[in-house]
């Protein structure tokens, strides 16, 4: 295992997977980033949580500093391999968007490794939108990327940050800058027309009732309704689920309100401890 500026690399069966790990003996809390982004979307949360928890922030395969896939893979299996390598289980999985899907998939496929879930803006793995705003935003993304128009792709992708009911100006400019920097790092790793080796975990929504650990759906109130509904569906289907909302936040509530997001994570886990059900 090598390390560069705090970034570590796990030699998986198909290339290296990058991650950061604060270490220590605290409860492992794994922060899972959204699609096309990377572990740096959690930069504010690591110092806020590390005094009490062992905080791990991986880059998913094909994102950030992790290797691209050379063959079929499941993101949940990658995460499970990393957690076993680090002996960091059962872990609390905190995921936004794609990260929420990874968290739910891991809880279903590798339940022995997971102690609780906190998911935002996703979780069922279903992205066939029916609401007009979301359909239009998704179509604009796909069309721009297929055409190789990266600037138009950034513009279309930025829309998810503010959501259907707020103007672009509602989100701080530096958040758009960070999102673009992360997307640029990931998209630069790939070439047009390369095969998509990702294999999704199937039937996440239909199997959500099998998730026995505590689940918190933590959405931004201004997120696209269908994305929020995915996380809420998982929380309502799971026997120990609950929901919470951060006002004036869209698809990335952790970026818009990092202090509040970290506080809610901490409160959720402390309440589990007080109830005698802390996942340790």
Image (cartoon, rainbow, N blue to C red):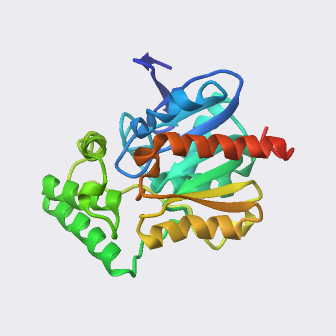
Q: From what the image shows, is residue 200 above or below residue 262?
A: below
- Which x, y percent locates residue 183? 28, 46
Residue 204 seen in render: no
Q: Residue at x 80, y 41 (%)?
A: 273
Q: Is residue 135 left or right of residue 11?
A: left
- Which x, y percent locates residue 167? 26, 63
- Which x, y percent locates residue 234? 63, 66
Q: From what the image shows, is residue 183 above or below residue 143?
A: above
Q: Quadrant of residue 62?
A: top left
Instruction: Say which of 182 and 133 sits in front.
Output: 133
Q: Is residue 179 left or right of residue 241?
A: left
Residue 266 seen in render: yes
Q: For the view shown, which residue lies furthest in the right direction?
A: 276
Instruction: Say which of 151 and 244 sits in front.
Output: 244
Q: Residue at x 62, y 37 (%)?
A: 29
Count of all numbered marks drawn on residues in the image: 0
Q: Residue at x 45, y 18 (%)?
A: 3
Q: Is residue 1 left or right of residue 66?
A: right
Q: Quadrant of residue 134?
A: bottom left
Q: Quadrant of residue 177?
A: top left
- Which x, y percent locates residue 159? 28, 61
Q: Name the quadrant of the C terminus.
A: top right
Instruction: Say which of 224 and 5 sits in front.
Output: 224
Q: From what the image shows, is residue 7 above or below residue 232?
A: above
């Amino acid at each position: 295992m090598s390390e560069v500026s705090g970034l570590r690399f796990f030699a998986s069966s198909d290339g290296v997977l990058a991650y950061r790990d604060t270490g220590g003996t605290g409860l492992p809390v794994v922060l899972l980033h959204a699609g096309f982004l990377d572990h740096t979307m959690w930069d504010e949360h690591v110092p806020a949580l590390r005094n009490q928890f062992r905080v791990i922030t991986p880059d998913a395969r094909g994102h950030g500093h992790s290797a691209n896939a050379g063959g079929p893979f499941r993101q949940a299996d990658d995460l499970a391999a990393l957690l076993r390598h680090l002996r960091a289980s059962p872990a609390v999985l905190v995921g936004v968007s794609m990260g929420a899907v990874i968290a739910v998939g891991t809880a279903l496929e590798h339940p022995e490794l997971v102690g609780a879930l906190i998911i935002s803006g996703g979780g069922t793995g279903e992205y066939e939108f029916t609401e007009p705003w979301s359909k239009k935003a998704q179509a604009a993304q796909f069309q721009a990327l297929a055409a190789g128009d990266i600037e138009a792709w950034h513009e279309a992708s930025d829309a998810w940050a503010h959501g259907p009911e707020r103007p672009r100006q509602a989100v701080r400019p530096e958040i758009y800058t960070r999102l673009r920097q992360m997307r640029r790092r990931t998209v630069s790793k790939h070439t047009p027309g390369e095969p998509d080796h990702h294999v999704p975990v199937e039937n996440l929504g239909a199997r959500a009732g099998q998730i026995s650990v505590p689940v918190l759906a933590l959405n931004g109130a201004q997120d696209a309704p269908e994305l929020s509904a995915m996380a809420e569906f998982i929380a309502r289907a799971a026997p120990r689920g609950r929901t919470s909302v951060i006002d004036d936040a869209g698809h990335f509530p952790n970026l818009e309100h990092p202090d509040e997001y970290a506080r809610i994570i901490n409160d959720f886990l402390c309440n589990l401890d007080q109830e005698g059900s802390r996942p340790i």
